[in-house]
Amino acid sequence: MPPRSILAGCGGYLPERIVTNDELSRTIDTSDEWIRERTGIRQRHFAAAHETTAFMGTAAAAAALADAGAHAADVDAIILATSTPDQAFPASALRVQAALGVTRGFGFDLSAACAGFIYALSVADGMIRAGQVRGVLVIGSEVYSRILNWQDRGTCVLFGDGAGAVFLRASTGVDDDRRGVLSTHIHAQGTLGDILYVDGAVGQPDKPGHLVMHGREVFRHAVTRLAEAVDEALAANGLGHADIDWLVPHQANSRIINAMGKKLGLPPERVVVTVDRHANTSAASVPLALAEARADGRIKSGDLVVLEALGGGLTWGSALVRL
Ligand code: UT7
């Protein structure tokens, strides 16, 4: 039987600086009331100059390795999902590799916006199942505070910075064969690229780029696509809503998260929510939420967890994991 990917450890990192809605409303035409009512966000973390994607990714990855009881020598590959890399190249994944003292294997960055972690998990799982690697760090790390348009109150209040990571290892004969990543399902629709994008890049003259979003349209797609992706994951495994122990969703808006929880018939206490404290940390949001719920003991070994996310591209996907 081919190996499975066991989710052996989780870790997260948040910048020290916390910025409340009230603090934002001192310089932006907004209010704590509007932000909380429309999104559920109360505060977010913003990175200091030294807290780059690679720096935060390294901290989250080190925590995931420690949680797994694993070491740098166990890492064959590092896949880092980000839209805000430190540099065009080398990949931020390789800055992490160097910082962790990993001296072999390979690594690369993956660009799929807020769905990046689900995409990276899918790629890592495929490589483990194929026997190409045995230990993979899958990281989501973002500094969206560097690409926000502070003149656009419809987007600049929604995002925060942070990193989350998991360490996946190939199963061995002694592992319970129900554990691990059961399946991943990733999708994209490039024709919807203009509803959520960054209007520049390193390759564009004088245009580093700012985030642009048509929020209502993204909201509409999020509610339908994410529900489809979760049902697709359950159907692929012959499982139903009643089998789910935990939903760990992308943290963009508490209204989307609540709608998903209801569709799945899950009580609120079975849905992991961090958007109130982290805001939307894009590719970092799912692994950060997972790390928090593992660390505080809510998600236990043996629990069936659904992960889902949707982002610019449009990209979206889901994963079913038994811890
Ligand atoms: O992570 C990637 C995936 N992203 C998402 O899933 C985000 C999906 N979209 C959303 O979460 C919501 O669409 C938003 C939170 C972005 C916006 O909520 P909305 O209920 O769709 O509001 P809206 O953009 O339609 O704006 C409603 C009103 C407007 O005023 P008028 O035209 O009705 O007078 C805006 O000008 O709210 C106003 N507004 C604000 N007011 C105070 C927009 N931003 C703000 C603000 N503070 N920050």
Image: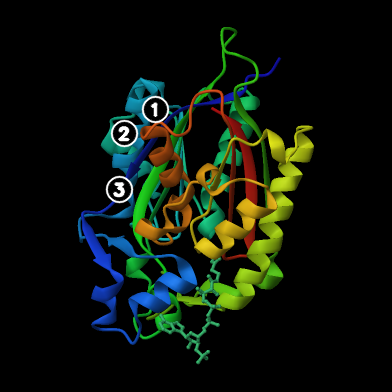
Q: Is residue 100 above or below residue 158?
A: above
Callout 3 crowding tier (Cα within 10 Å): few <14, some 14–19, many ≥20: many
Looking at the rendering, in which quadrant would you find the N terminus? Answer: top right
What residue do we see at 50% from left, 61% from top? 254
What residue do we see at 39% from left, 59% from top? 276
- For the residues labelled 2 and 1, the Cα–Cα distance comes to 17 Å
**If you read the primary sequence from the N terminus, does the residue marked by circle 1 or circle 3 appear first?**
3
**If you read the primary sequence from the N terminus, does the residue marked by circle 2 or circle 3 appear first?**
3
Q: Which residue is mark 3?
A: 56
What residue do we see at 27% from left, 68% from top? 20
Q: Is residue 5 above or below residue 24?
A: above
Name the residue nearer the viewer: 305 or 15. Answer: 305
Q: Report the number of discs.
A: 3
On the image, the x and y values in percent for residue 265 come to 67, 47
Q: Secondary structure at mark 1?
A: loop
Q: Amino acid at mark 2?
A: Ala
Callout 1 crowding tier (Cα within 10 Å): few <14, some 14–19, many ≥20: some
* Residue 221 picture quarter: bottom right
* Residue 164 picture quarter: top left
What residue do we see at 40% from left, 21% from top? 74
Name the residue nearer the viewer: 73 or 189. Answer: 189
- Horizontal side of 227 relative to 285 (left or right) equals right
Q: Is residue 188 visible?
A: no
**If you read the primary sequence from the N terminus, does the residue marked by circle 2 or circle 1 appear first?**
2
Q: Which residue is mark 1?
A: 104
Q: Amino acid at mark 1?
A: Arg
Extreme residue in the top direction:
174
What label does residue 62 carry, if any?
2
